[in-house]
Amino acid sequence: MPTDLSEFESRPEKVMRSSIEVGADGGEFTTGELTRPIQLASDWNAVLEGFGLDPDEFYVVDDTVRMSKWQQSKRTESGDRDVVWLYSYKARFARCSPQATEADVEQLRAKIDKWRPKTTKTVGTGEPCTFVINWADWQIGKSENGGVEATVDRVQKSIEDCLTRIKELRKAGRNIEKVAIFNMGDPSEGCSGNYSAQTFTVQLNMRAQLNLVLDLWTQGLAAIQPDIFASVLCNHGEWTRNGGSKPITSDSDNVGGYLGDTLQRIFGDDGPSEWHVAHDEMVQAITLSGVRVAITHGHKISGKEFEWLRGQAQRLQYEDGVMPRLWITAHRHHLSIEDFGAFWRFQCPSLDGGSKWFSDMTGKWSTHGTLTMLVGNHDLRGWSDVAVL
């Protein structure tokens, strides 16, 4: 493999040579010595082409790039010697995820439409409580671990499991007076602006993502028939313009608000009796069987988490006179339950396909699941019977 990579000048007579290892999903390369640094995305395209790779099929994974830089003496045309800078890069590259065709999307939507859960209703007794279902970080459109179809299967299974769980709890004597579904954020993946490789890895465009989420939300509400539905604002739901990473209008320009509004229009009087769809507020407070619950996606949490939650709880108390006893957050994809004394905080797991980047960087991964619980004064903590389904 020659060290000359497109318009990049190199010094093939030197010891450091270019090399590449190619696998089914990508690989790793070393450029060899270059006489100028790589600074633009088009430069990386030239590097890929120099190795015989199509930039439309492969992309450089930017967080793996390693650069070496050193000085070397060089004789000029006049016979004098001068010092020049030389550069070399080592990086991983990956194959772009194939875009789903319109036929693929229609097949998925037809599959969703045909699915029906099997369940029967039972009635429990005892102190009233509310069964809470937290739909968190589905990120429909992601390609990891089976992609969209695998995520849809997990969502539908969780709906069935929730119906089974409600029946079990009522049979055990829990008096579930209401059922609440919370969209805890990031139901869709988005196509750009959240991380550099997003456009290369998503399987669906924005229109297809929103349609599939709406299909699943509609199906979930029809099957579970909740009394309460709430939807928060989220970072993957921010509608941006001209390639920016933040909305240029207001926080209300968000998928969480839009899909919640649309769902309410679809169901009208036949849907939940309570709707709590965020407009531009990042935190909402809802009373469930006598217990005040605060919900937020979690992407706005900064600094020490406890201090942020406590400050927001005090603000909520100032605004409506009630301090929340429970906090429910998402965004981090991992299950966590913490007792802060003044309140409990529940961090929701997700149903998405995971994050290769996160696992590569940390060695961690999250286990799929939907967080459910009972909320009410039936328990001195204000909650009980937590289950990840």
Image (cartoon, rainbow, N blue to C red):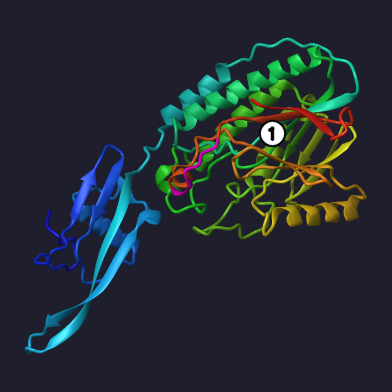
Residue 269 colored magenta? no
Q: Position of residue 320 (x, y in %)?
A: 90, 50
In this view, the residue in front, 229 or 3, is: 3
Q: Main secondary structure of the magenta part?
A: loop
Choose between 350 and 178: the one closer to the eye. 350
Magenta highlight range: 361-366
Residue 363 painted magenta:
yes
Looking at the image, residue 37 lies above or below residue 17: below
| Viewer-closest of 102 and 190 | 190
- Residue pictured at 68% horizontal, 21% vertical: 162
Does residue 247 lie above or below 352 as drawn?
below
Assign the C terminus to one quadrant of the image: top right
Would you name the residue on which mark 1 appears?
134
Q: Residue at x 59, y 36 (%)?
A: 350
Q: Position of residue 166 (x, y in %)?
A: 75, 19
Q: Residue at x 38, y 55 (%)?
A: 62
